[in-house]
Image (cartoon, rainbow, N blue to C red):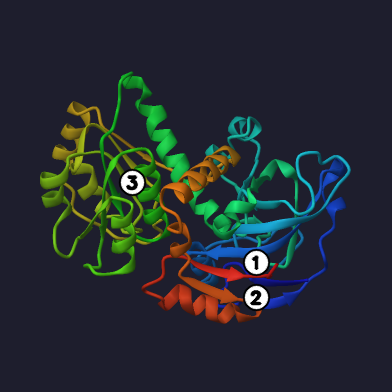
Amino acid sequence: MKAICITPSEPHTACLSELPMPRIDEISAGRGVLVQVLQVGVDGTDRELYEGEYGAAPEGFDFLIIGHESFGKVVEVGPSVKDLSPGDYVVATVRRPGSSIYDQIGTYDMTTDDTYYERGINLLHGFLAEYYVEDPEYLVRVPAGLKHVGVLLEPMSVIEKGVEQAYEIQGRLKVWQPHRAAVMGAGTIGMLAALGLRLRGLEVTSFALTPKPNLPASLIEEIGARYLSTREISVAEAAEQYGPFDLIFEATGYSPLVFEAAHALAKNGVLILSSITGGSRRVEVESDRLNLEFVLGNKVMFGTVNAHRGYFESGVSDFAEAEVTWPGWLTRLLTHPIRGLINYEEMFRALAEAQDAIKIYVIVSEE
């Protein structure tokens, strides 16, 4: 079996390796599921792993198979597997349970452990391979009618978690009904966040750097949202015209924007942070003003990362609704296909250089 591997924490060590075929008996109690990988989405995490910024190999290995955004087809199941059959399409969740109470009750995306286990990122092999074996607990079935966009479900699960958590938090207000939302960023997460919020009936304003015309702007406007370039209007100016915003989803990877977004929140508003920022940027903050606005305005800011299977299942439901409401919209997010694991160098070049990419993905196998 072929797989794309790196030596963790060492930059530019990616290679195409020949590895043993996984077996369903690697999962105990007859619960193994062998999956043929069809497509794998790649993102900034994969680029950072390639650059040696983080990552760890599984115990007993000196390499890590990368790739955490999977889509595949079941080819074999163990005797104890009842809910999946050969031919089913599936995506796999990313994080696996540790030892905290949150892990033990199935909310492993909320772990308090210092050591975490994520497929393709930390201590567990990922999905940029021809096959993998998994327990059905971590596999989510994708209807055949959504197989053309199944590779987008992992990033969509991040949106589902953030938005659902926002509504849960504001359940404290009893009658919280957000009307205006803002999305910071027009990459994969930003585009899917705009979609998820529009599906919930919110008026959405999306912010990005690049002025119109461009593909993300066209797609945003097709779903009835507003696209603004921060090179043409500031977040503060936009908030005066179109806000303040009851809910803001930040997905730019540029941490100083968080504080601009915080000032644009309405009273009782929620700011969702989803960017992983490993740099050392510093900004001067109007701390007294920010503190006052959050205290007197009952505002909330929280971070979201990863997702358990329930959020993947919510993503399937939202994708089904999106395909009916805006047919073909999701497919247009898949801008940069890489054909075959053998072209892994092209994949990394695209991650570094493709400024117009919304989603880069590898076609591992054709059906």
Question: Closer to the N terminus: mark 1 or mark 2?
Answer: 1
The amino acid beneath tag 2 is: Leu
Q: Earlier in the sequence, mark 1 or mark 3?
A: 1
Q: Which mark is residue 128?
A: 1
Any part of residue 11 in sight: no
The front one of 6 and 261 is 261
Q: Position of residue 291 (x, y in %)?
A: 20, 35
Q: Amino acid at mark 1?
A: Leu
Q: Earlier in the sequence, mark 3 or mark 2?
A: 3
Q: CA distance from mark 1 to mark 3?
A: 29 Å
Kind of element beneath mark 2: helix
Disc 3 versus disc 2: distance between alpha carbons? 33 Å
Q: x%, y% of residue 355?
A: 36, 74
Label 3: which residue? Answer: 249
Can the viewer see residue 309 in this picture?
Answer: yes
Task: Tell me how many marks there are.
Answer: 3
Disc 3 marks which amino acid? Phe
Identify residue for label 2.
341
User: Which image quadrant is residue 67 in?
Assistant: bottom right
- Is residue 114 positioned above or below 36 on the image? above
* x and y percentages locating residue 237 in the rendered image: 11, 51
Q: Are marks 1 and 2 in contact (CB under 8 Å)?
A: yes
Instruction: Identify whether 206 is placed above or below 212.
Output: above
Location of residue 247 in the rendering, given as x and y in whole percent from the top left corner: 29, 39
Residue furthest to the top in view is 174
